[in-house]
Image (cartoon, grey):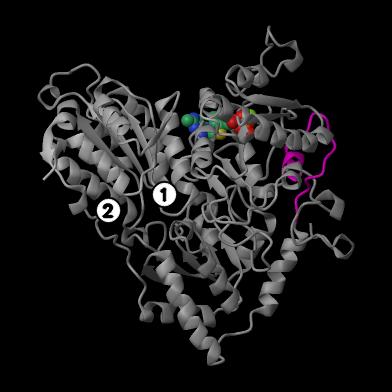
Amino acid sequence: MPRMKAIQAAVQILQREGVRHAFGVPGAAINPFYAAMRESGAITHVLARHVEGASHMAEGYTRTAAGNIGVCVGTSGPAGTDMLTGLYSAAADSIPILCITGQAPVARLHKEDFQAVDIAAIAKPVTKLAMTVLEPAQVPGAFQQAFHLMRSGRPGPVLIDLPFDVQLGEIDFDIDAYEPLPVHRPAATRIQVEKALDMLEAAERPLIVAGGGIVNADAADLLVEFAELVGVPVVPTLMGWGTIPDDHRLMAGMAGLQTSQRYGNATLLASDLVLGIGNRWANRHTGGLEVYRRGRRFVHVDIEPTQIGRVFPPDLGIVSDAGLALQRFVEVARERQAAGRLPDRGGWAEECAERKRTMLRRTHFDDVPVKPQRVYEEMIKAFGKEVRYVSTIGLSQIAGGQFLHVYRPRHWINAGQAGPLGWTLPAALGVCVADPEATVVALSGDYDFQFLIEELAVGAQFNLPYIHVLVNNSYLGLIRQAQRAFDIDYCVQLSFDNVNSPEVGNYGVDHVKVAEGLGCKALRVQEPGEILPALEQAKKLMAEHRVPVVVEVILERVTNISMGTEIDGVVEFEELATRGEHAPTALGALNLDQMQFLD
Ligand SMILES: Cc1ncc(C[n+]2csc(CCOP(=O)(O)OP(=O)(O)O)c2C)c(N)n1
Ligand SMILES: [Mg+2]
């Protein structure tokens, strides 16, 4: 049996489990791991500038391709605590990442050693497993279990904390005798699917709500196949956006309080049955449950048994991996189609499509300073269907959800539940590492951008080119809007006179100078007509210099974005589209002459 340090076995296991990249920040307590990684040569390491950044890079990396597991690494003490936000974000959105931390030697754990903190205890609520490994011989098993748990059931993150002496302890280990553990994924039974399809058949206006579980199961094709078979329109959640292309005739829009379309909410409200697959009835999707549930029945398919009934009791709950359930749904629906049993949904689908053609918000404004809606219109023009968008939180993300178009799963990469400011930039870098050929476009407000701005240097150092669209209103815009309810505008201003950059007026931070200082390229845009040329120029700069390119659009300071607390009560602040030219990039409304708009 080969004899080696426990940490060398760990690195061999990482390789065997498919890890090729790690994101991290070294420190004394994790140096044995770095030595083993260097010796193996099989894992490339991206050096973050902030350990939280490394954790979000790992998440962006995981989300980009099925099967990916992002790894983030840090030393003992503050490195682990810095990564907690990344663990929370990953856990909340069911994303596996593996967080590896160094730790003080076992015998000194209780002596308040330098940078010794019980990170496993702190990380417990935001991981599937958080473990300080106390025996070198347990290291292989800890990693084996980590991968098993991250991939099984509802995916999620794991933290493995490795005391210094445990990393260096000698063990007998043979990687050829190592086998990844089988992955556990429950599958819907035929009886369950028959019952769900009976309910679907009995309904007059059924909908499918498609959640992020479909993305995790890599089952978007099956979703579209099933929807087409039964002719039922699909409302994706924010996490499921892209599972059905936005321009598909059965894509009925998103429903919810913020990242939703008017037609998506209207269609949900008109439905009488909702089949939720791989979704979790997030409160930003449902709003008040009384309105959401009134007059309709629900089927809920989820991989995690305790998710069924968590938010409200469904009429039928099915515990299943979304992909395995969809396989069965397609199989049984095909049989029913052959038997002539499937009802014709043409009228209902057309009603939904008609709403999608007509219930539009206006995006075409010529105002200076620029209105945010216009930015999304120009982004759609600049980037094709293959673009991968990355965003997190704020009015920028909300308006992005309302106005952008997504055509593929994993092409809208968004921290859905946790919404931690600063996530966008490092997550985008993780996406670049996972898919170097992709056009990656990040979308941030000025505050989100400033939160982990130093990570731009990582993009410059490691040649990770992407475009960062920075919509600058010099405000904590979302919170300013929320403070209207309190009749205050308090502690939300980011504006000040920048003594070094009179050209930014009172917008405060000179993002162009900061980005350039960190080794990136940056363009600033003041007028709507300049946006598209700037985005085109950014593509060229990105190709030429292989570094991140920031395109900052100076927005009007105050624009309220449509939102509400109930899906039948979303407040519209701007003029709605009443003519085709008001919403030139809206889908379904491209035949402008034939359009009739609804208020
Ligand atoms: C770590 C963290 N702190 C606070 C918040 C609350 N929050 C949500 S959006 C926001 C303001 C975002 O401002 P900006 O990024 O400029 O976007 P805008 O809304 O102006 O488009 C804040 C403070 C958060 N999501 N995360
Ligand atoms: Mg802002």
Residue tagged by mark 1? 68
Q: CA distance from mark 2 to mark 1?
A: 14 Å
Where's ligand 2: which quadrant? Answer: top right
User: What residue range appears in magenta?
Assistant: 360-377
Q: Is residue 400 left or right of residue 329?
A: right
Rendered image quadrant of residue 74: top left
The residue type indicated by label 2 comes to His
Q: Is 59 placed above or below 113 here?
A: below
Q: Is 196 one of the magenta-colored residues?
A: no
* Outermost right residue: 593
Labelled disc at residue 148: 2
Residue located 71% across and 71% down the image:
351
Q: Quadrant of residue 181?
A: bottom left
| Quadrant of the image containing the C terminus | bottom right
Question: Which residue is rendered at x = 73% and y = 30% of the image?
Answer: 555
Given residues 120 and 29, the one toward you in this image is 29
Considering only order in the chain, which callout, 1 or 2, is on the residue closer to the N terminus? 1
Visible residue check, residue 256: yes
Helix, strand or loop at disc 2? helix
Q: Is mark 1 within 8 Å of ligand 1?
A: no
Quadrant into which the N terminus falls? top left
In the image, what residue type sits under mark 1?
Asn
